[in-house]
Image: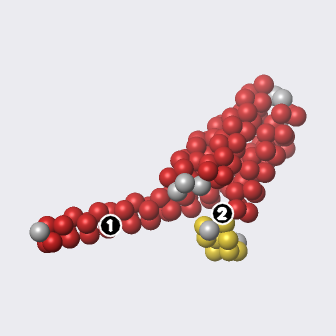
Amino acid sequence: MKKTLVLPVLLALGFSICVIAQSEADYSGWMKDIAKTKGKVKKGIDSKANDDVATDASHLAGLFKQVGAFWSGRGASDAVGYAKSAETASNDLAAAAKTGDDAKMQSSFATVGAQCGMCHMAHREGEQGNFKMK
């Protein structure tokens, strides 16, 4: 009886560890993509490249949706809220870029940055190039 339970338990444990590790690898990739895309959005706003801003802001919204799902799985409701607010602000930014509303683009971009900052303060430690989740 013990032998028939040990193997499935070990397999399940190994699988769950692989899923968690994969999720953290995905998360790191999303964070790098968010940083790169935020830089592109800032340059686009500054140069009035509204079509590019709209495209990149929509991409950000999708990334923040994934980040929210990641934190939801970890039970971090504050981080889920930050991600949802950043997703909404990114969608607002895309809509503002499509209509050429410079003030709304600036305020939406500032909201995205503020949400990132709050989440990093709550859930990130370490230094540039060596960040870890708390």
Instruction: Return the residue nearer the eye: 109 or 8.
Output: 8
- Taking 42 as reference, is 8 above or below it? below
x then y, percent, for residue 16: 36, 62
Residue 72 appears in the picture as rendered: yes
Crowd around label 2: few <14 · some 14–19 · many ≥20 (10 Å): some
Element type at mark 1: helix
Mark drawn on residue 13:
1
Q: Decide: marks 1, 2 in contact (CB < 8 A)?
A: no
Q: Is residue 54 left or right of residue 70?
A: right
Element type at mark 2: helix
Residue 60 appears in the picture as rendered: no
Residue type beneath disc 1: Leu
x then y, percent, for residue 66: 55, 47
Q: Residue at x 75, y 46 (%)?
A: 112
Instruction: Return the residue nearer the eye: 34 or 69.
Output: 69
Q: Residue at x 11, y 69 (%)?
A: 1
**Can you say which quadrant of the picture contains the C terminus?**
bottom right
Considering every residue shown, the one lying at the far left of the view is 1
